[in-house]
Image (spheres, helix red, strand yellow):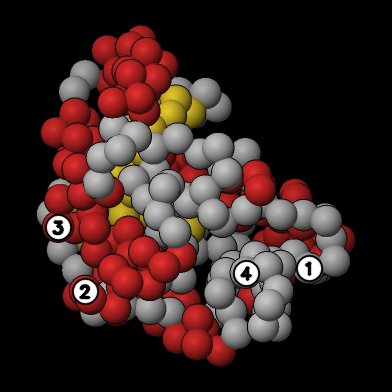
Amino acid sequence: MNSTITAAGGPELAVRAARELEEASAQEIIAWAAETFGDQLCMTSSMADALMVDLASKAAPGIDVIFLDTGYHFPETLGTRDAVSSVYDINLINVEPVRTVAEQDLALGPRLHGRDPGICCHLRKVEPLQRALAPYAAWLTGLRREDSVTRRDTPVVQWDKRRRMTKVNPIARWTQEEVDSYMAENGVMVNPLQYDGYPSIGCEPCTRRVEPGEDPRSGRWAGTGKTECGIHV
């Protein structure tokens, strides 16, 4: 699909698709996106698990998968990234910030993630993703309405105003039970940290274990009042 046409008709296309695909399966939503956008479709993955990679690689084999290599990831996350790249039919794109961690420390002082996590996330996640998504007309995400209060109104298709592209959320309606069932039935690869008290996995300095009964995302930026890295808001 021509990117100029996509940009011009994007908001209308997204609204119509969100309405028409609300009751569609995740596979049908991804198939629609692949047919609509072709090689201008990509997806992002944090490598907490390979659920979305599994779904997307079946509906759109060879799809570009963007991984934001912040320089602060757990070794287990990087290991999952490498394993996922080897097992699934995808094209992994490893995206790094403009500055290394050492260069950022030199320019802005050490432990920026502790002093101002918002700026750190912007420099190491938001800005790199902005660059990485520039060649595409649409992207797939693993957002779910159950994830948090800020995501409860997530449509299955939406117009990303900031990036002027279509954002597709195929599993927006899925419950945790549906996630667990699909992953078990399909043998989906999982970051081993999931079995060690980390149901939501981000950068190592800003992620802690979650106690039984706590909100699954409460281990992210704990004690800072921050709930999102900025990619999806």
Question: In the image, is residue 79 above or below residue 121?
Answer: below
Pick whichever of labels 1 and 3 is earlier in the sequence: 3
Does 165 sit left or right of 26 as displayed?
A: right
Three-letter residue code for mark 2:
Asn
The residue under label 3 is: 58
Q: Which mark is residue 186?
A: 2
Which residue type does callout 1 highlight?
Ala
Q: Nearer the viewer, residue 177 or 31?
A: 177
Residue 109 drawn at (x, y percent)? 83, 62
Q: Indicate whether 71 appears above or below 37.
A: below
CA separation in Å, label 1 and label 3: 36 Å
Q: How many other residues sit within 10 Å of disc 4, few (<14), some (14-19) or many (≥20)?
A: some
Query: Which amino acid lies under the numbered mark 3 shown in the image of this protein?
Result: Lys
- The residue under the point 35% across, 25% down is 19
Sequence-first tag of 1 and 4: 4
Query: Tag 2 or tag 4, which sits nearer the N-term?
Result: 2
Pick whichever of labels 3 and 4 is earlier in the sequence. Answer: 3
Of callouts 2 and 1, which one flags the residue occurring earlier in the amino acid sequence? 2
User: Is there a contact, CB below 8 Å, between mark 3 and mark 4?
Assistant: no
Distance (Cα) linking label 3 and label 2: 12 Å
Dot 3 lies on which element?
helix
Q: Name the residue under label 1.
A: 222
